[in-house]
């Protein structure tokens, strides 16, 4: 049974910031990469528990996307009842660990 992928307002803002940061409007390669990121996020509908737990909080998981040095980290929570994946935050992999106040 598939999980519902819920994109929070924070994650939606993060996606918009990534889109701007990689200049996807003016680059076909960047737009292709961005679309791949969105496909990877939607792939969480099936087997969302396949990704590792975050070091900051074992109730959250991370999906890593991209190649060094351009790896992005998608932080999400899986709820079994109802079967839902809450996309919480998207950040560049080189950034420092997040604080609890950043992800709710």
Image: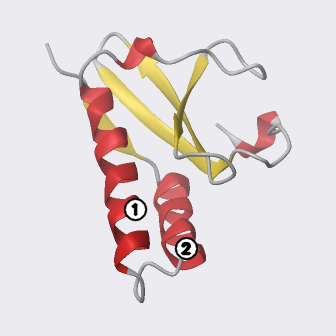
Q: Secondary structure at mark 2?
A: loop
Q: Residue at x 46, y 60 (%)?
A: 12
Q: Secondary structure at mark 1?
A: helix
Q: Which residue is mark 2?
A: 22
> Residue 52 placed where, x, y %?
57, 15
> Residue 93 placed where, x, y %?
70, 44
Quadrant for residue 98, please give it. Answer: top right
Task: Indicate whether 34 appears above or below 62.
Answer: below
> Residue 84 placed where, x, y %?
32, 25
Left or right of 80? Residue 2 is left
Labelled pair 1, 2 in contact (Cβ < 8 Å): yes
Q: Residue at x 33, y 29 (%)?
A: 44
> Residue 90 placed where, x, y %?
58, 49
Q: Quadrant of the N terminus?
A: top left
Left or right of 31? Residue 99 is right
Mark earlier in primary sequence (1, 2): 2
Q: Quadrant of the C terminus?
A: top right
Q: Residue at x 65, y 46 (%)?
A: 68
Q: Which residue is mark 1?
A: 34
Quadrant for residue 81, please give it. Answer: top left
Residue 91 or 101: which is nearer the viewer? 91
Q: Residue furthest bottom?
A: 26
Task: Indicate whether 102 appears above or below 29.
Answer: above
Q: Residues within 10 Å of mark 2 (few under 14, many from 20)?
A: some
Residue 65 or 68: which is nearer the viewer? 68
Quadrant for residue 48, please give it. Answer: top left
């Amino acid at each position: 049974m598939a999980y519902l992928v819920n994109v929070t307002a924070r994650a939606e803002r993060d996606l918009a910031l990534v889109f701007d940061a990689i200049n996807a409007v003016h680059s076909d390669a960047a737009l292709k990469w961005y679309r791949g990121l969105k496909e990877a996020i939607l792939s969480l509908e099936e087997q969302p528990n396949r990704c590792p737990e975050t070091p900051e909080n074992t109730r959250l998981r991370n999906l890593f996307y991209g190649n060094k040095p351009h790896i992005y980290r998608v932080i999400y929570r899986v709820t079994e009842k109802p079967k839902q994946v809450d996309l919480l935050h998207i950040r560049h992999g080189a950034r420092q660990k997040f604080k609890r106040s950043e992800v709710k």
